Amino acid sequence: MYDFTYLRPRTVAEAVEALRTGFDPKLMAGGMTLLPTMKARLASPATLIDLADIGELRGISVRDNRLEIGAMTRHYDVASDGTVRARIPALADLAGGIADRQVRYRGTMGGSLSNSDPSADYPAAALALDARMITSQKTEAAGDFLLGTFATSLEEDEVLCRISFAIPEAAAYEKIPNPASGYAMTGVFVARLAEGHRVGVTGAASEFFRHRDLETALDGGADHAAALDVPAPDREYLADMHGDARYRRNLVRVAAARAIQKMQS
Ligand SMILES: Cc1cc2nc3c(=O)[nH]c(=O)nc-3n(C[C@H](O)[C@H](O)[C@H](O)COP(=O)(O)OP(=O)(O)OC[C@H]3O[C@@H](n4cnc5c(N)ncnc54)[C@H](O)[C@@H]3O)c2cc1C
């Protein structure tokens, strides 16, 4: 490691102030992505702002029929919390399927969504559950927050504070993991909300997206077998040694049908 200034603010306001006044600052949640990146010298912030002591960034609560989760809530807590399990079990299942136990004990929902890795799991849930991203500056829909590969709408002096999810009537997540990394080669989150179905897709393309044709089919009463007839939308699908773009596009269809079967059973 190299020398840097390490700060541990106790409030969001202090963290924002540190972002504004610190030299070349960077926020740290659990460090699960950031620390390896620093070790590899792909990032070398001069001021590291550790969010660990900020109590207002933690916690899980229900408000106005929405589930609100603090950005510093760890994957382990999302997976095991009784309120999440009771209100959105599919979200708890998703969190329990992230990485390994060590990463789930350190990695956070806010760190994952702020990082916007195109193969991360939470973005699919955020799109399907009509999530609102509550930051130190604004509240906006997940679709506006998640701009693409490692890109969000966060400004340099902005902290993601909480994520508010609609509580669905039913929901399910299906992930087809990359055999090497365990990240999603494709992950599809389906949800039936009071106002209709929503389907969020991660991993398959360079951007997360909603599968609107499938949402329409589900609103029309399609089951998992009928869902197989709904092709994934035209997009730029990812291609690598684990699967080409055509294969990834087909995985969306397969993962969606499995998720729908789980949701409807
Ligand atoms: C071995 C391994 C396997 C993994 N497998 C999976 C997987 O299968 N699925 C999956 O979804 N993820 C996976 N991950 C990612 C993991 O889930 C972490 O959530 C992710 O690495 C972010 O970690 P973190 O929360 O510790 O954030 P950090 O690494 O601390 O931060 C990540 C980035 O977000 C920024 N940031 C953090 N918190 C905030 C905030 N509140 N406001 C604004 N910016 C913020 C930081 O500045 C940094 O740029 C894996 C990671 C590892 C190391």
Image (cartoon, helix red, strand yellow):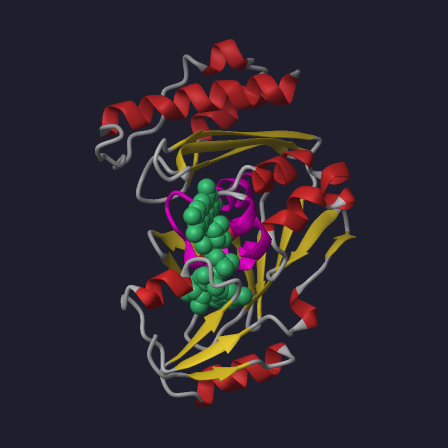
* In magenta stretch: residue 102: yes
Residue at 66 percent of width and 55 percent of height = 69
Q: Residue furthest front?
A: 1
On screen, residue 197 above or below 50: above
Quarter holding residue 169: top right
- Residue closer to the observer: 262 or 48: 48
Q: Is residue 159 visible?
A: yes
Residue at 37 percent of width and 61 percent of height = 36
Q: Is residue 144 visible?
A: no
> In this picture, which residue range is highlighted in magenta?
101-128
On screen, residue 86 above or below 61: above
Query: Residue 113 at x, y = what percent?
Result: 49, 54
Q: Residue furthest bottom?
A: 21
Task: Tell me which secondary structure the magenta stretch mostly adopts.
Answer: helix
- Residue closer to the observer: 71 or 107: 107
Residue at 34 percent of width and 36 percent of height = 180
Quarter holding residue 211: top left
